[in-house]
Amino acid sequence: MEQTSVLSVRKIVITGILAAIAILLGVTRLGFIPVPNISGNATIMHVPAILGGVMEGPIVGALIGTIFGLFSFLQATSPIFKNPLVSIFPRIWIGVVAYYAYVGSRRAFGEIPALAIAGVLGTLTNTVLVLSMAVITKLIPIEVIPSIIPQAIAELIIAAIITVVVVGGWKRIESGSGGASV
Amino acid sequence: MDEFELARYVTIGQYLPLDSRVHRMDPRFKLVAFTALVVAVTFTPSYIGNAVLLVLISYLVVLARIPFGYALSGLKPALPVLLLLMALQMIFYTEGFAGPAAGIACVPLFKVWLIEPTTCSLKLALVSAARFIELLMLTSLLTLTTTTTELAHGVERLFAPLQRRINFPAHELALILTIALRFVPTFAEELERIMKAQVSRGARIGGYGRFRVIQNTKALLPVLVPLFMNAFRRAEDLILAMEARCYVGGRGRTHYTELHSTQADYLGLALALGIAILVLAMPWPW
């Protein structure tokens, strides 16, 4: 008898498809939303990793994050992201954190708020880890961080909205009623 | 209408079909050698170490017959950011990588008002810039000399022994990579169609300027939500198709292509590993 794989067909396909969207958002500039600060752009490229984590569990979330990180490292034209410690390592954890945030808060707050919390915490994982790694590797000075806060807030809100709308829409959760009807 | 032509921005698999030793290298060996050199570049804080790596990587670019301008095409657009970062490093990191803690004396170069760059902060800025250039060349080298199919095969075979021992999903990882790369152009087309459809209904996508973040974000939703929904629908189709054909991954599958390593592959790998270890292990004085 063949040993069954840790990854089901469903997990393989969802990971591949969401990773494709993450790569696409990166190459088409659609994943960048212009904001007025030093980096110039807020990003939504990490959202597929959050969606994967919430929908299919931490392994799928971690894999999508890793592929997103690998491509952001290979395709980066910014000195900050041309460093595997900044571009790959932090991205692994986005989907993992999103999954546990979703599962942990679903019971207490209900389906829709849990999705928003997953979006927010997944994004925070990305922002905090990327910035810490950039400061640890001395690529950017800690004094620059405050200028990134408005962008981080924009990213949190965008990610929360997209997570709620997409996962909620896909699972056909009735919004507004508070209760879930998956 | 330019903003709707997304497919042409998809430059994944920018492969330069040339015949060179680097192109012919077994993808498994190439991946390990690439990883070793990336680690070496990332963790080397010395001038000499970086010089050694810069020479080696430049040699590899020449060996792969890739024009330097092409390998370094990412440098020009990054130059303003690079210079800004170097200036920030000079101003704020006067202790350099470790500074006095590591027993290195930092000599101030000059002083203008509160700004006092030292030899240490100069080193940090120069080494960071060198690292960026080295990594830029290394990643170009990998993507320009290896097709995406070869990469997927390489990943799969590299981890195949782990699949046999601890059931590590090597085959599945390769399949995930293949699916991801396969669907990028499809989704680019789909995205294009969605954008045109929404604009023809009066939507305005982006272009509100930097200060209207909320409008810019709202404008993206009518595009992103259908994109994700369509993607999930495609995923369900693919899952159904694979399950209907009783797809079983992993152990026991045979392959259409077999990878064969030659002596040159071992030599290349030994060279990359040797230099990586040498650069990382030696206590370079500068």
Image (cartoon, rainbow, N blue to C red):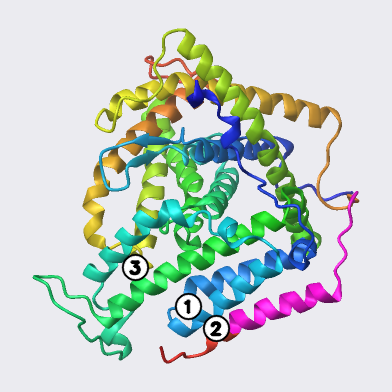
Along the viewing direction, whichever of B3 and A74 lies nearer the viewer: B3
Q: Are marks 1 and 2 in contact (CB under 8 Å)?
A: yes
Pointer 1 local density, CA inside 10 Å: few below 14, some 14–19, many at least 20? many
The image shows residue A90 at horizontal and vertical percentages of 46, 55
Alpha carbon separation for disc pair 1 and 2:
7 Å
Q: Which residues are magenta?
A: B255-277
A76 versus B161 height, above or below: above
Along the viewing direction, whichever of B171 and B76 lies nearer the viewer: B76
Pointer 2 local density, CA inside 10 Å: few below 14, some 14–19, many at least 20? many
B8 versus B21 height, above or below: above
- Where residue B25 sits, quadrant-wise, is bottom right
**Magenta stretch: includes residue B257:** yes
Q: What residue is pinned by disc 1?
A: B44
Amino acid carrying mark 3 in the image: Lys
Q: What residue is pinned by disc 2?
A: B279
**Magenta stretch: includes residue A128:** no
Alpha carbon separation for disc pair 1 and 3:
13 Å
Q: Is residue A168 visible?
A: no
The image shows residue A19 at horizontal and vertical percentages of 59, 40
Q: Is residue B209 left or right of residue B75?
A: left
B266 versus A105 height, above or below: below
Amino acid carrying mark 2 in the image: Val
Q: What residue is pinned by disc 3?
A: A138
In the rendered image, residues at marks 1 and 3 fall on the same chain: no
Per the image, label 2 sits on a secondary structure element best described as: helix
